[in-house]
Image (cartoon, grey):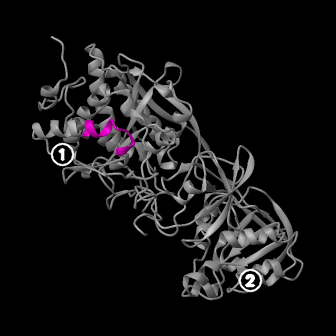
């Protein structure tokens, strides 16, 4: 007798078995999450041994479930190169040929040597009202500048005065004045007022134009005493920039037509913390049980469900492509790579379902974002809710009307970039997010099993929805534009969507703009590289973020972008989000 999955069987509480089961059960989900979020996987950092083990784990179960390989050249994987976060290397500093101790650098420093006479620029600011810098008043051309961190106005000063201590600005000002290198340090007087002993490696991100060395307070005082004495210094900062190979894991359940729905979840996490961790200074394993072992486990169980259909020769009208993305925590890298280099014809992809953090379901509800990006989603949500209600399944959709919950924070955005409808399921931020405390024992597995009932019905409805119902509907602007799982909505609203994985020589590459935003109205387009915002040159995303602090709503500025390699001037006027924030 053939095993078929119909509405009756969906609602039956079947016992777990050794092969692919006809219903998604809490123990199956728990088994996947516990394996993925075990200390043995060391937080599944992209390109790490733990991530490779996780990719093999997924592949083995997809093979067992009867799915077909959907990766590159008939494999289960799609590999791509990623650049890992920079790390401090063995930086060196010599003064008159003698090596100096207590030396490091910042992440943004180029790996270049610089030599010259040492001169002091004190704090680097002499007129806070006009934000003039000492570098312009000094003859620093061809020299190495010693700069005191913070400002002379103290750590208790106003935010406006504190901004004069912006390290990125100090470095760029020194470079603009002709300095060949810069040494940053904290004077003991500033330490007494609460300053840091040593400038941290992460204090300056992105890319700076001249070599940067940081020193401890003892070394800083020693160097300060040698300024004005024609001391010859040699800077040799070292920033280690490792590249690794990441793997998307992809499995196919073909339908009877050439159309596909992509079901995706990212399986990577933060490893031992570092950049992205919300536990400052922690070097503990960040297991990422909810983020996103939960979404990975759910996607794996959905894949097994469609594997049963394949084995029963019960294929749907549309195929299902199950994708386990790598590199999401580093900027949606895996999904962005796939839409740029898809393993099937992207014209045949009608939509995407993204599962990111679906494990905290104590309330019996889950947030649904981007539901308005295709007409097909609303009836599928209604149908699946009715199925859950008729079976007394304790789960309800909390549909965010007209909003893209999650903003640019998860892999559905890679599909929006290509004008492909994408819907996002998300159980919410919690106090364990991006911390070592996001562990498997805190996941609500019974709730996940209930969610699976609705997701299966939802996908089955999409299998037969009219193709015309998948026409992409760009969401209207919302009060939460720019917010979400990773987004921040504080300050001025610009509305560009950065390509976090892009490596460009200068500027900030964007994937597109938020609906109704100043950037959209100014005419910025996907593929533009922003190189100037008002008077500020933009070398990277950090320069861009810094530049926004200088503007107010109602102000009109010129934004310069490189479009097809040619500079293009655009007029942008800032205005509040629809909520008035």
The secondary structure that most of the magenta stretch takes on is helix
Residue 376 colored in magenta in the image: yes
Q: Residue furthest top?
A: 1
Kindly identify the residue that appears in the image at 40 percent across and 36 percent down: 352
Whichever of labels 1 and 2 marks the residue nearer the N terminus, that label is 2
Q: Which of 268 and 558 is in front in this view?
A: 558
Q: Can residue 239 be seen in this view?
A: yes
Q: Give above or below for 357 relative to 104.
A: above
Q: Quadrant of residue 127?
A: bottom right
Residue 313 position within the rendered picture, expressed as x and y whole percent measured from the top left: 28, 13
Q: Nearer the viewer, residue 155 or 103?
A: 155
Q: Which quadrant holds the C terminus?
A: bottom left
Residue 316 shown left or right of residue 529 in the figure = left
Q: Quadrant of residue 133?
A: bottom right
Looking at the rendered image, the disc whose residue lies closer to the viewer, 1 or 2, is 1
Residue 212 position within the rendered picture, expressed as x and y whole percent measured from the top left: 73, 65
Residue 445 shown left or right of residue 137 in the figure = left
Q: Mark 2 points at which residue?
A: 122
Q: Which residues are the magenta region?
A: 372-381
Residue 13 shown left or right of residue 148 in the figure = left
Q: Mark 1 points at which residue?
A: 395
Residue 361 position within the rendered picture, expressed as x and y whole percent measured from the top left: 23, 50
Q: Which quadrant holds the N terminus?
A: top left
How far apart in space, not on screen, are marks 1 and 2 (Cα)? 62 Å
Counting other residues with Cα less than 10 Å from the Cα at mark 1, is it few (<14), some (14-19), or many (20 or more)?
Answer: many
Q: Give above or below for 213 relative to 206.
A: below
Kindly identify the residue that appears in the image at 76 percent across and 76 percent down: 146
Residue 233 position within the rendered picture, expressed as x and y whole percent measured from the top left: 83, 70
Kindly identify the residue that appears in the image at 72 percent across and 67 percent down: 213
Kindly identify the residue that appears in the image at 78 percent across and 81 percent down: 134
Residue 353 colored in magenta in the image: no
The secondary structure type at the circle numbered 1 is: loop
């Amino acid at each position: 007798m053939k095993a078929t999955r119909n509405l009756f069987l969906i609602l039956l509480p079947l016992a777990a078995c050794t092969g692919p089961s006809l219903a998604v059960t809490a123990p199956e989900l728990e088994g996947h999450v516990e394996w993925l979020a075990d200390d043995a996987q060391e937080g599944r950092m992209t390109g790490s041994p733990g991530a490779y083990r996780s990719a093999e784990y997924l592949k083995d179960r997809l093979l067992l479930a009867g799915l077909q390989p959907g990766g590159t050249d008939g494999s289960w994987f799609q590999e791509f190169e990623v650049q890992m976060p920079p790390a401090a290397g063995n930086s060196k500093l010599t003064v008159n040929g003698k090596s100096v101790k207590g030396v490091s650098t910042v992440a943004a420093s180029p790996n270049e040597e610089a030599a010259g006479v040492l001169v002091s620029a004190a704090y680097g600011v002499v007129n806070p009202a006009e934000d003039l810098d000492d570098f312009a008043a000094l003859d620093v051309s061809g020299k190495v500048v010693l700069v005191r961190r913070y400002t002379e106005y103290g750590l208790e000063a106003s935010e406006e005065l504190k901004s004069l201590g912006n390290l990125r600005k100090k470095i760029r000002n020194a470079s603009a004045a002709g300095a060949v290198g810069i040494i940053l340090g904290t004077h003991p007087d500033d330490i007494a007022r609460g300053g840091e002993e040593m400038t941290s490696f992460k204090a300056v991100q992105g890319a700076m134009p001249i070599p940067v060395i940081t020193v401890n307070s003892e070394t800083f005082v020693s160097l300060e005493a040698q300024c004005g004495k024609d001391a010859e210094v040699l800077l040799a900062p070292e920033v280690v920039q490792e590249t690794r190979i990441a793997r998307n894991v992809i499995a196919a359940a073909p339908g009877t037509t050439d159309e596909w729905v992509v079901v995706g979840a990212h399986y990577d996490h933060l490893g031992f913390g570092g950049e992205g961790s919300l536990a400052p200074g922690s070097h503990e394993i960040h297991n990422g049980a909810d983020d996103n072992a939960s979404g990975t486990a759910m996607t794996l169980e959905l894949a097994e469900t469609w594997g049963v259909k394949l084995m029963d020769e019960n294929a749907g009208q549309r195929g299902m492509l199950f994708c386990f993305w790598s590199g999401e925590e580093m900027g949606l890298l895996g999904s962005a790579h796939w839409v740029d280099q898809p393993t099937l014809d992207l014209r045949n992809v009608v939509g995407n379902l993204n599962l990111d953090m679906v494990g905290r379901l104590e309330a019996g509800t889950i947030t649904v974002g981007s539901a308005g990006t295709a007409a097909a989603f609303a009836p599928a949500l209604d149908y699946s809710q009715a199925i859950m209600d008729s079976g007394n399944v304790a789960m309800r959709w909390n549909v965010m009307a007209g909003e893209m919950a999650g903003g640019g924070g998860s892999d559905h955005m890679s599909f929006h970039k290509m004008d492909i409808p994408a819907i996002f399921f998300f159980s919410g931020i919690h106090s364990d997010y991006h911390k070592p405390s996001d562990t498997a024992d805190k996941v609500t597995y019974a709730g996940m099993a209930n969610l699976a009932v609705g997701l299966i019905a939802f996908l089955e409805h999409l299998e037969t929805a009219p193709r015309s119902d998948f026409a992409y509907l760009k969401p209207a602007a919302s009060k939460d534009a720019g917010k979400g799982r990773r987004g921040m909505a504080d300050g001025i609203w610009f509305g560009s969507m950065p390509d976090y994985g892009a490596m460009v020589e200068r500027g900030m590459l964007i994937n597109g703009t938020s609906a109704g935003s100043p950037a959209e109205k100014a005419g910025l387009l996907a593929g533009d590289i922003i190189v100037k915002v008002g008077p500020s040159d933009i070398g990277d995303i950090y320069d861009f973020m810094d530049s926004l602090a200088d503007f107010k709503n109602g102000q009109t500025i010129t934004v310069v972008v490189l479009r097809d390699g040619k500079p293009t001037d655009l007029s942008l006027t800032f205005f509040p989000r629809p909520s008035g924030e």
